[in-house]
Amino acid sequence: MLVHTQLFHDEITLRRYSERTRKAYLYAITKLAEHYHQSVDTISDTQLSDYFRYLNLERQLSRASIQLQLNGIHFYFEHILKRQFRIDVCLPRPSQKLPQMLSKLDIGQLLQHCPNQKYHTMIALCYGCGLRVSELVNIKVSDIDGQRQLLKVCQGKGAKDRLVIISPSLLNLLRHYWLKYHPQTWLFVVYSHGNTYPLDVSSVRKTLKKAALAAGITKPCSPHSLRHAYATHQLAAGMLLNQLQHQLGHKSIKTTERYLHWSPELGHKGGDLLADLG
């Protein structure tokens, strides 16, 4: 029901949006068309308003999910249909729940229950550098600078490159991994019909879930949980907030500051007031 599919893909490519964004936006506009059983071109502003009320009231999607749908549909209307987007969307209030952070002990248990050296190294790298899963699976052998102990993260979120510090112990793991598997282009690969491809993110998530189950970890455990753990553990170890911002590839320092809100003990510099009262 999308009459401008190729134009949509061309526009996404021109703007250098990620494949994840491409899929999310395409999903959003496809679901809109399926909901009304008509071409997106013919959907009215009233229908659009009703659709987002449906997502909010009936589907009860989270604020983030509705916002993603809104971004995709707005993109299609503005850049493909060249049509003004005039509707007001009421988003639900954001959730205030604090995430359950993985401890260092949890990380150690996860690594012990990885099925092989390949996944052990992958999970260690994800945690040890605070990587997004999309960044992890797209690392090339040439991105690792062992002499300078740096990892080049190419085209991370926002299509930006950055250099991330690799600890000596993690670098040692990577060297042992290379000696065993001898990857040539992609650091973590799959083979299909004689060709090599970067590992799919679903494989990382499935392996992590199995390792958590085997280790008896009941906390939410995903690649992003490892990234959260990296941030909190580095702050606890004394890393400065602006350095952590660079390591994580955050555009705004406010995004990095949330780790202080989630773990207030990290920034606690006060004394024990009751102890002073005698």
Image (cartoon, rainbow, N blue to C red):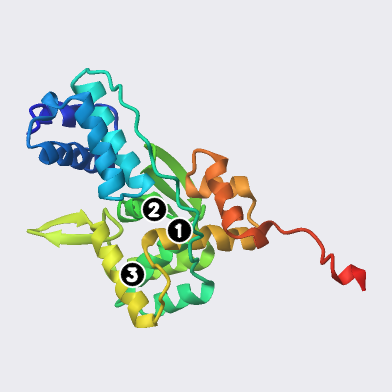
Q: Which amino acid does label 2 sit on?
A: Arg
The front one of 221 and 58 is 58
Mark before the other along the chain sequence, 2 or 1: 2
| CB-based contact (under 8 Å), mark 3 and mark 1 | no
The residue where tag 3 is placed is: 208
Residue at 53% across, 64% down: 168
Spatial separation of the CA atoms under disc 3 and disc 1: 13 Å
- Image height check: is 73 above or below 65? above
The residue where tag 1 is placed is: 227
Which element type, helix, strand or loop, lies under badge 1? helix
Mark before the other along the chain sequence, 2 or 3: 2
> In the image, is 80 to the left or to the right of 108?
left
Residue most toward the right? 278
The front one of 74 and 109 is 74
Quadrant, the C terminus? bottom right
User: How many other residues sit within 10 Å of disc 3, few (<14), some (14-19) or many (≥20)?
Assistant: many
Spatial separation of the CA atoms under disc 2 and disc 3: 14 Å
Residue at 67% across, 62% down: 265
The answer to whether one can see residue 118 in this image is no
| CB-based contact (under 8 Å), mark 2 and mark 1 | yes
Q: What number is the disc on residue 49?
A: none
Which element type, helix, strand or loop, lies under badge 3? helix
Q: What residue type is labelled 1?
A: Arg
The answer to whether one can see residue 145 in this image is yes
| Residue 111: quarter of image | bottom left
| Residue 223: quarter of image | bottom left
The residue where tag 2 is placed is: 132
> In the image, is 216 to the left or to the right of 258?
left
> In the image, is 19 to the left or to the right of 42?
right
Quadrant, the N terminus? top left
Image location (x, y in percent) of residue 3:
7, 28
Residue at 23% across, 25% down: 45
